[in-house]
Image: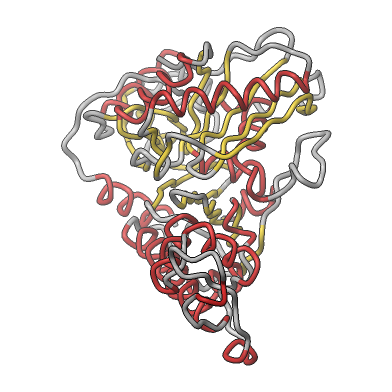
């Protein structure tokens, strides 16, 4: 079982992003300034992973071993544990609330721990693995917004917790694949949370922003407000889904569809697209001249429809959770799919926000290749370690059953607070 984050005395940390399209590993050292300095980097095409979940243990383990080995060789260091991001597995959020009497005396540490435990027990977590338990704020006699209650006097102490969890099975499979590569998992971090740490500016985290990580097998998204992640979710649609759409509509092999998406793809149509022919070989043909007649407009229509549907789905998830107001006015897109032309413009239009592409930052030694949006999650894992996120992330608290509705609890909390 993964354990709560504890950096080794040497400050050496390793981050591993197990994606559906690629795997990436970064090894860094965190010094006294709490800034990670990159020592090693490795990445390669993924294997054994689909829609963010491991589906072939042997293939995934071999790919993990290879990518970690590449990072170790560059760093000239050996690693035995890794921070891992998880994009699939049904990762989502719930808000848990509890109160405990303190009878007018000064609040002590035992009171804080008691109310945290009570709130945790309210989270609906049957068959779920808890990744993050984040206090959103304390309340004294109903007065909310208290950041540090210790030493203050009150009749009742309350707390709101943001609990991020995922299905137990996919989490166990990640642990097993890492163990097969002789690695221990320090902490599993929700992908949207990690990516947000890498690409959001401090003002965006404080004032409210939504980060969308467009991966190969799924799209993860997270909402930050008041400096914390307050909502995470994902949809099982990603860049590979879009590639298959192109292959089906243009009747071309998947590899050619991926090439077309990368070279000629766009979410936004242009007037000249109807007259611009694209090379789309027919399935079973090596010569593009024998392919299905297609224009760039045909390609753009497929991409526009799928991406518009994806952003509408995300917007609906946010509305269903009562999160529209808390999500802020900023939208930051990252992940490999953020390199698609026009994706920020389309996302901003669908979701009614100012949108930009987010490149990962905050790790010393990143070169241009590593600062690509496709590596946001792995960079964010290093940021998670460097910023001691686990100091306020009560990860690995025991899951306690509850039958209450996750969406209903979220909606009620955010309507009250935003």
Q: Is residue 160 visible?
A: no
User: Which part of the image, by quadrant, shows the N terminus?
Assistant: top left
- Is the residue 220 above or below the residue 187 in the image? below
Q: Residue at x 42, y 13 (%)?
A: 110
What is the x, y in percent for residue 17? 56, 34
Residue 124 placement, left or right of 23: left
- Is the residue 201 above or below the residue 348 in the image? above
Residue 408 placement, left or right of 115: left
**In this view, which residue lies farthest toward the top?**
9
- Is the residue 82 above or below the residue 135 in the image? above
Q: Quadrant of residue 42?
A: top right
* The one of 282 and 381 positioned closer to us in this rendering: 282
Q: Residue at x 50, y 51 (%)?
A: 223
Residue 342 placement, left or right of 179: right
What is the x, y in percent for residue 37? 80, 27
Q: Residue at x 35, y 29 (%)?
A: 156
What is the x, y in percent for residue 157? 38, 29
Q: Residue at x 42, y 64 (%)?
A: 310
Q: Is residue 40 visible?
A: yes
User: Which part of the image, by quadrant, shows the C terminus?
Assistant: bottom left
């Amino acid at each position: 079982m993964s354990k709560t984050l504890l950096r080794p005395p040497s400050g050496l940390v390793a981050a591993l992003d197990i994606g559906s399209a690629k795997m990436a590993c970064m090894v860094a050292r965190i010094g006294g300034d709490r800034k990670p300095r990159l020592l090693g980097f490795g990445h390669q095409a993924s294997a054994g992973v689909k829609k963010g979940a491991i589906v072939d243990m042997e293939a995934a383990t071999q790919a993990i071993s290879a990518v970690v080995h590449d990072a170790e060789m560059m760093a000239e260091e050996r690693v035995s544990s890794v921070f891992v991001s998880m994009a699939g597995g049904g990762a989502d959020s719930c808000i848990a609330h509890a109160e405990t009497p303190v009878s007018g005396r000064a609040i002590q540490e035992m009171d804080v721990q008691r109310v945290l435990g009570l709130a945790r027990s309210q989270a609906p977590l049957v068959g779920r693995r808890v990744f993050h338990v984040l206090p959103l704020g304390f309340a004294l006699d109903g007065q909310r917004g208290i950041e540090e209650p210790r030493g203050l006097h009150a009749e009742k102490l309350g707390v709101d917790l943001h609990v991020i969890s995922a299905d137990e099975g996919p989490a166990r499979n990640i642990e097993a694949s890492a163990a097969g590569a002789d690695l221990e998992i320090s902490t599993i971090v929700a992908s949207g949370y990690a990516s947000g740490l890498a690409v959001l500016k401090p003002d965006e985290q404080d004032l409210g922003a939504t980060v969308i990580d467009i991966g190969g097998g799924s799209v993860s998204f997270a909402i930050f407000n008041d400096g914390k992640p307050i909502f995470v979710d994902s949809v099982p649609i990603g860049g590979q889904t879009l590639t298959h759409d192109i292959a089906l509509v243009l009747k071309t092999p998947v590899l050619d569809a991926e090439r077309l998406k990368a070279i000629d793809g766009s979410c936004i149509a242009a007037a000249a697209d109807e007259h611009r022919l694209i090379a789309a070989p027919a399935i079973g043909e090596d010569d593009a001249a024998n392919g299905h007649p297609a224009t760039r407009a045909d390609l753009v229509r497929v991409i526009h429809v799928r991406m518009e549907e994806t952003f509408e789905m995300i917007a609906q998830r946010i509305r269903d959770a009562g999160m529209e107001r808390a999500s802020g006015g900023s939208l930051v897109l990252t992940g490999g799919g953020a390199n698609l032309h026009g994706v920020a413009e389309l996302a901003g239009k669908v979701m009614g926000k100012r949108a930009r592409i987010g490149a990962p930052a905050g790790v010393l030694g990143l070169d241009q290749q590593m600062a690509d949006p496709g590596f946001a999650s792995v960079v964010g894992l290093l940021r998670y370690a460097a910023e001691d996120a686990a100091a306020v992330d009560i990860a690995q608290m025991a899951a306690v059953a509850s039958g209450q509705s996750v969406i209903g609890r979220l909606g009620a909390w955010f309507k009250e607070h935003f």
